[in-house]
Image (cartoon, rainbow, N blue to C red):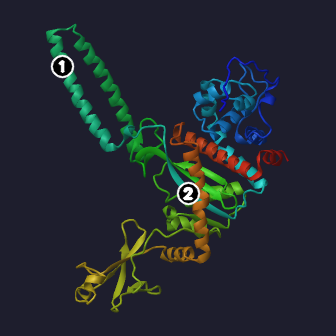
Amino acid sequence: MAYRYGNREQMELFPPSIEDYISQYHPVRAYDAFVEALNLNELGITLDNHKVGNSEYYPKAMLKLLIYGYSYGFRSSRKLERAVHDNFSFIWLTGSLRPDHKTIAEFRRRNKTALKNVLKQCARLCIKLDLIAGNTLFIDGTKIRANASIKNTWTKERSEEALRKIDERIDEIFSECEAADEDEQDQPSLVSMQEELHDKFALKAKIEDILKELNETNKSSINSTDSECARMNSIQGSHAGYNAQAVVDEKHGLIVHADVVNENNDRQQFAVQISQANETLGQKCLVACADQGYSTTDELEKVDKQDIKVVVPPCEKSDIKKSFTYNSENDYYLCPEGHILENTGLTSDKKSHIYRIENKSFCSGCARFNTCTKSKRGKTVSRLLNEEARQRFENQYNEPESQEIYKLRQQKVELPFGHIKRNLGVNAFLLRGLDGAKAEISLLASCFNISRMITIFGIQGLIRAIMA
């Protein structure tokens, strides 16, 4: 059978215009149209054509480079630099501009605030195109590594232990220096000891600053590389990272709002993330749904008070058995044997009331002693301060309609993180600090939305819709 062979010496006539390099159906044209539709002033980028000094690259061209690059896994500034030299789609997109990696990295660093606002404009564009309805919102979170090692995480205990060892080593070096002065003054060993002494003092000063910050801020730990990241626990183990949040619309699974926090769990995120998503929508959603990690009664109440239906499985379990009857009028519990458990105060966290039987002999002599309680002090029951609300949310979650909504949650809200982590290969943020991580998650979420928009409309259809 015959084979086709390439020939590097074959002469070809390239198109006379860069415009002819790219097909009308190439995805890069959709990304170009999207960025052209962005309002730079709303993003926070001010254009000044009369600016004095050396000219800089046009901000929209740099935005196009970042958004299109992130969409295809080109996040490194050096990879983007190579792309604008070698990849026809990047050459077309930037109009043959070839910024170097330092320029790309500096633009991304200086415009973190503007990059954080890209997703908001993207979501509002989706609303105008009737791709986001804003009726039911799903929220989920995932852990993403920071641009820092967990080995550089310092706690108070580690700092104090390190300072103790450094002081011991400094004393040893002083003793060795004195011995070296008496014996042989100009030996290389003396020079190396002085260098080590200098390094130890520098390290001591650094750790003392960390310990001072720990005491002033009441933080449990600080990473010396990225002071705003936190120790995250995930299925991959413990690492320095951030907790990325996404709020997704039910209609087409598009991201309405994305955020990054440095808290290890999602317990305090439900209300704030839904509120920020509603701000982007310009209206209140009708239903807010999340998994059990967001189930804190206080947080659910904040959303429920806005007349938004909450669909979240209960997490705060009540230890009250159904056989115990609560008397709301007199605030006591009645056990199955007819004995009263009186309110004796609050728990240490001030979130629950404690109910205890007055005469402990009732329990020790009861036929249910080993099954109801084994405590010699008698039966104790705790009741959340907002127990009625907890029960109402639990009943609401168990409704058939709510169960259908919750089943849909996994299909909608877990897809974006799967795309970002698996398809785009994002296993860590490149920028340090909360602002840097927020800027990157905004870019990544926008890239996911654009990809979904292309799937829904097609390339030419999306371009026409944006231009209209």
Q: Crowding at label 2, few (<14), some or many (≥20) Cα neighbours within 10 Å?
A: many
Residue 308 x %, y %: 64, 68
- Residue 458 picture location, percent across and down: 76, 48
Pick whichever of labels 2 and 1 is earlier in the sequence: 2
In the image, farthest residue toward the top? 186
Identified by mark 1, the residue type is Glu
Pointer 1: what residue?
176
Residues 93 and 359: in front is 93
Residue 378: give x, y in percent of width and height. Answer: 27, 81
In the foreground, 32 or 135: 32
Quadrant in the picture for residue 215 = top left
> Which class describes the residues within 10 Å of circle 1: few (<14), some (14-19), or many (20+)?
some
Q: Does 324 sit above or below residue 423?
A: below
| 245 on left or right of 44 | left
> From the viewer's perspective, is the residue at label 2 or at label 1 nearer?
2
Name the residue type under label 2.
Answer: Asp
Q: Quadrant of residue 411?
A: bottom right
At x 63%, y 39%, the residue is 72
Residue at 35% across / 30% down in the picture? 205
**Residue at screen point 62% across, 33% down:** 108
**Where 105 sits versus 25, above or below?**
above
In the rendered view, does 190 fall on the left or right side of 66?
left
Provide residue 421's location: percent of width, then percent of height: 55, 46
Q: Residue furthest front?
A: 1
Q: Which residue occupies 50% across, 57% down?
A: 266
How many discs mark residues in the rendered view? 2
| Closer to us: 201 or 30 | 30
Mark seen at residue 140: 2
Indicate the secondary structure of the residue bearing disc 1: helix
Residue 189, picture quadrant: top left
Relative to 298, residue 431 above or below: above
